[in-house]
Amino acid sequence: MLSLQGVRYAWPGTLADCLDIAELRVGAGRSLFLYGPSGCGKSTLLGLMAGVLVAREGQVELLGQDWAALPSGRRDARRVDHVGVVFQQFNLLPYLTVLDNVLLPTRFSALRASRCAGTPLQAAQALLERVALPAPMWARRADALSVGQQQRVAAARALIGAPELVIADEPTSALDAALRDDFMSLLMHACHAAGSTLVFVSHDERLADRFDDRLSLPFLNRAAA
Ligand code: ADP
Ligand code: MG
């Protein structure tokens, strides 16, 4: 599903590699927890996996396609077809309603729209129910929701149209403990139901038990100081 081979990445304007990864493979439908302290390169690695960043050496293949072999416009189109993303914060377009935020991937990707069970609107409503967001909130502007509610909307948006890969970059770090546990359960159940592979990064090792596989990024990364 996802395969990294001999990957090196250096940020523009820097001399030393930030990441140097000999090999990493993630199987279809698996959930992987990648952990390590702040600054160890977790977000950089997710950027490479999602084709937002391009390795200077090696291959990062999603579904057998190396991101570096595509021009940037094709990378953007391929990303919205196959990848759902949840960030730490600022996930939603604040002036759009909850429903319109969830529907966004289906507006940019015919593939994601075609994979919805029923219409995209029905799929969005089903996902919002799955992440326990009550119907009276669906027509509200995204910025009228609490942070915990916004993260659940972001999870629904990442999952609509069942992308093969869902990547989550510390999505629970703005949540308190009770909300964090709820969110983790909702995210993992929703990924499982969609058949999506989940790559989740965090510095919080307490979350590790919930995943099929666990990897320490400083251990994996040969460029780690
Ligand atoms: P993490 O997500 O694990 O906290 P990051 O991937 O954000 O780590 O950062 C890894 C390293 O790359 C850090 O040393 C950071 O300073 C550097 N870095 C991150 N983003 C940029 C950027 N846009 N430009 C230059 N260096 C960056
Ligand atoms: Mg980060």
Image: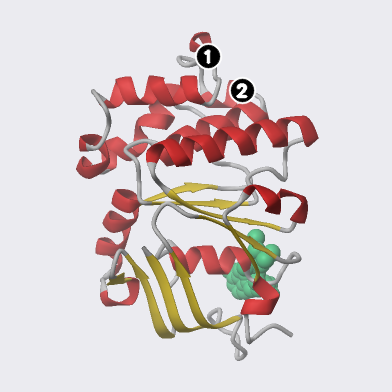
Residue drawn where x is 25% and y is 62% of the image? 74
Residue under label 1, please give it: 137
Q: On residue 50, which mark appears?
A: none
Q: Which picture quadrant has residue 91?
A: top right
Which residue type does callout 2 highlight? Leu
Label 2 CB-ligand 2 distance < 8 A: no
Query: Is residue 198 visible in the rendered structure shown here?
Result: yes
Which residue type does callout 1 highlight? Met
221 sits left or right of 190 in the view? right
5 sits left or right of 110 in the view? right
Q: Which picture quadrant has residue 103?
A: top left
Q: Position of residue 106 (x, y in %)?
A: 29, 36
Of residue 93 and residue 1, the one placed in the foreground of this image is 1
Q: Is residue 65 above or below residue 118?
A: below
Q: Identify the secondary structure beneath mark 1.
A: helix
What is the CA distance from the residue labelled 1 to the residue labelled 2?
8 Å
Residue under label 2, please give it: 145
Proximity of marks 1 and 2: CB atoms separated by less than 8 Å: yes
Coloration mode: secondary structure
Q: Position of residue 48 (x, y in %)?
A: 46, 69
Q: Position of residue 160 (x, y in %)?
A: 37, 35
Q: Position of residue 179 (x, y in %)?
A: 72, 31
Circle 1 Cα neighbour tier, 10 Å, few/some/many (<14 / 14–19 / ≥20): some
Q: Identify the secondary structure beneath mark 2.
A: loop
Residue drawn where x is 51% and y is 8% of the image? 136
Q: Is residue 58 above or below residue 110?
A: below
Residue drawn where x is 68% and y is 78% of the image? 219
Q: Is residue 192 above or below residue 120?
A: below
Of residue 12 and residue 36, the one placed in the foreground of this image is 36
How many numbered discs?
2
